[in-house]
Image: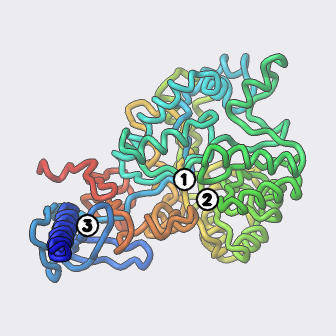
């Protein structure tokens, strides 16, 4: 009798477990997104018309809308003739640094204390609570503009970006997926700020930077960031940083399964970063052809940061302050002459012409040549906005996204621009199995634009639909 009762009990229990499992499976939301086109950045192929089947927060199936059936109970999102793209990736940004406002000429002359002062110094001495709230706003604005993943590379206080990341991941705040770096590593003498009050200098700088001297100190700096559970290590590389010091930091980071992004702009610093084995070179403005070859052979990434390109600072400054006619002329230059000069230079560089003398050409002209040399070298590349500037009338996301089409102005094909902020960027971050493409198994991070971004790359500045992890963030198509 007891055996029979036990058998009945086990049968009922088994049925209950099966029923619970079935209910759990049925509770996973299923969504079908339809659109006129879907662009695969990796191959350049277009599916038209397209459909994406989503289960929960992941993509289950991608294909032709005419061949894909609609699962029972699925929510259908019809975006008409829109073009679907993977969620955009900003691989170099500063979410917790309050927007820098251009300073009047007299203010810059009287109080210059480093490249970003006083804005940089004001950011450091702000309340950490205020900074993280600013970061939350900027993160939301990025997401609304189609940026579903960012790599935050410093200027966030001690743990601002890791805490913001965790709050977003926990669903407390809207924002993109964040790879956080914590504090930037620097040697003494490399900081962006100089001539601080000696009694306060160390305390101020320690809020923003991990300063080190020597290989052992570099390893310890990495460990301090590891304690705060960072996703990536950022090192500022200047001429006084030695290869052994940087190599020690990189070795410690790799031992903790973290990639290292090296801020390096001049030739000497770039060579140090290459020799030490950094995973990516940020900025890299003065890179040589030989250095690009070394990067290609080592599989290193070149991360474009076209922040100032295309007259950006001139527009920002002109919008927020009055300038002398002389300075305004210097800032604006002649865009038309620049474009004409580039059209000739691009062809010359592609045919093997040497890099031009920097003293004889404008910043835009230099950047045009840089784009062409990187493309020609075959090195892997991505792009980040490096955004921390105030642009009146634009959100942080709108300003950030506006920087990417300037790569096309410099001669980069539209498809390569899109790759730089999707598939390429995902690989550089080590997240190619999660984001960067609309493929089965990846997060359902999807954006849509009305037109064809290959024909008009500025379409990425007009994202009308944003989905992150299967959840709709924005859908302007629904109002039409």
Tell me the residue at 42%/57% (across/down): 88
Q: Helix or strand or loop: what does disc 1 sit on? A: loop
Numbered circles on residues, count: 3
Tell me the residue at 60%/26% (across/down): 123
Sort mark 2 into few (<14), some (14-19) or many (20+) by Cα contacts within 10 Å.
many
- Give the label, 3 or 1, closer to the camera: 3
Q: Position of residue 143 (x, y in %)?
A: 37, 47
Q: Which residue lies under the disc numbered 2? A: 303
Q: Are marks 2 and 3 in contact (CB under 8 Å)?
A: no
Color scheme of the displayed model: rainbow
Q: In the displayed structure, does residue 399 sit left or right of residue 98?
A: left
Q: Are marks 1 and 2 in contact (CB under 8 Å)?
A: yes
Q: Which residue lies under the disc numbered 1? A: 384
Tell me the residue at 66%/77% (across/down): 351
* Among numbered discs 3 and 1, the one appearing first in the sequence: 3
- Give the label, 2 or 3, closer to the camera: 3
Q: Position of residue 227 (x, y in %)?
A: 66, 45
Sort mark 1 into few (<14), some (14-19) or many (20+) by Cα contacts within 10 Å.
many
Q: In the displayed structure, does residue 185 sit left or right of residue 69?
A: right
Q: Helix or strand or loop: what does disc 3 sit on? A: strand
Q: Helix or strand or loop: what does disc 2 sit on? A: strand
Q: Give me the disc on residue 239.
A: none
Q: In the displayed structure, does residue 428 sit left or right of residue 243?
A: left
Sort mark 3 into few (<14), some (14-19) or many (20+) by Cα contacts within 10 Å.
some
* Among numbered discs 1 and 2, the one appearing first in the sequence: 2
Camera-nearest residue between 47 and 277: 277
Location of residue 98 with respect to 29 vertically, above or below: above
Q: CA distance from mark 1 to mark 2?
A: 7 Å
Q: Which residue lies under the disc numbered 3? A: 55
Q: Position of residue 72 (x, y in %)?
A: 9, 71
């Amino acid at each position: 009798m007891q055996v029979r009762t036990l058998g009945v009990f086990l049968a009922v229990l088994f049925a209950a477990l099966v029923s619970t499992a079935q209910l759990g499976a049925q509770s996973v939301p299923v969504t079908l997104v339809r659109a006129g086109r879907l662009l695969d950045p990796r191959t350049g192929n277009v599916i038209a018309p397209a459909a994406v089947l989503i289960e929960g927060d992941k993509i289950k199936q991608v294909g032709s809308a005419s061949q894909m059936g609609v699962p029972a109970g699925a929510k259908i999102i019809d975006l008409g003739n829109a073009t679907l793209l993977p969620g955009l990736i900003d691989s170099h940004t500063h979410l917790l640094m309050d927007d820098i406002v251009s300073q009047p000429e007299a203010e810059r002359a009287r109080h210059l204390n480093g490249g970003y002062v006083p804005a940089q110094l004001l950011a450091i001495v702000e309340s950490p609570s205020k900074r993280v709230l600013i970061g939350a706003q900027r993160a939301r604005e990025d997401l609304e503009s189609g940026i579903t993943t960012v790599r935050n590379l410093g200027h966030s206080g001690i743990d601002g970006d890791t805490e913001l990341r965790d709050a977003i991941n926990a669903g407390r705040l809207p924002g993109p997926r964040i790879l956080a770096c914590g504090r930037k590593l620097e040697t003494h003498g490399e900081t962006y700020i100089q001539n601080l009050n000696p009694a306060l200098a160390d305390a101020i700088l320690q809020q923003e930077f991990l300063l080190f001297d020597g290989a052992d100190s570099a390893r310890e700096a990495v460990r301090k960031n590891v304690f705060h559970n960072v996703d990536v290590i950022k090192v500022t590389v200047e001429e006084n940083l030695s290869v052994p010091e940087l190599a020690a930091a990189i070795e410690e980071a790799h031992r903790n399964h973290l990639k290292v992004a090296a801020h390096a702009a001049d030739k000497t610093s770039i060579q140090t970063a290459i020799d030490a084995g950094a995973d990516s070179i940020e900025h890299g403005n003065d890179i040589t052809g030989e250095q690009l070859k070394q990067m290609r052979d080592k599989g290193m990434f070149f991360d474009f940061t076209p922040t100032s390109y295309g007259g950006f600072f001139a527009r920002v400054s002109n919008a927020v302050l009055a300038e002398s006619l002389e300075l305004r002329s210097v800032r604006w230059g002649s865009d038309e002459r620049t474009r004409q000069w580039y059209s000739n230079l691009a062809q010359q560089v592609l045919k093997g012409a040497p890099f031009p003398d920097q003293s004889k050409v404008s910043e835009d002209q230099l950047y045009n040549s840089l784009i062409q040399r990187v493309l020609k070298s075959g090195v892997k590349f991505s792009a980040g906005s490096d955004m921390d500037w105030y642009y009146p009338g634009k959100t942080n996301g709108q300003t950030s996204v506006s920087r990417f089409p300037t790569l096309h102005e410099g001669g980069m094909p539209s498809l390569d621009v899109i790759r730089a902020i999707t598939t390429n960027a995902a690989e550089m971050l080590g997240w190619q199995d999660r984001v960067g493409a609309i493929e089965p198994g990846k997060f359902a991070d999807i954006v849509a634009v009305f037109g064809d971004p290959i024909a008009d790359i500025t379409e990425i500045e007009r994202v009308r639909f944003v989905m992150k992890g299967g959840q709709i963030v924005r859908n302007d198509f629904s109002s039409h």
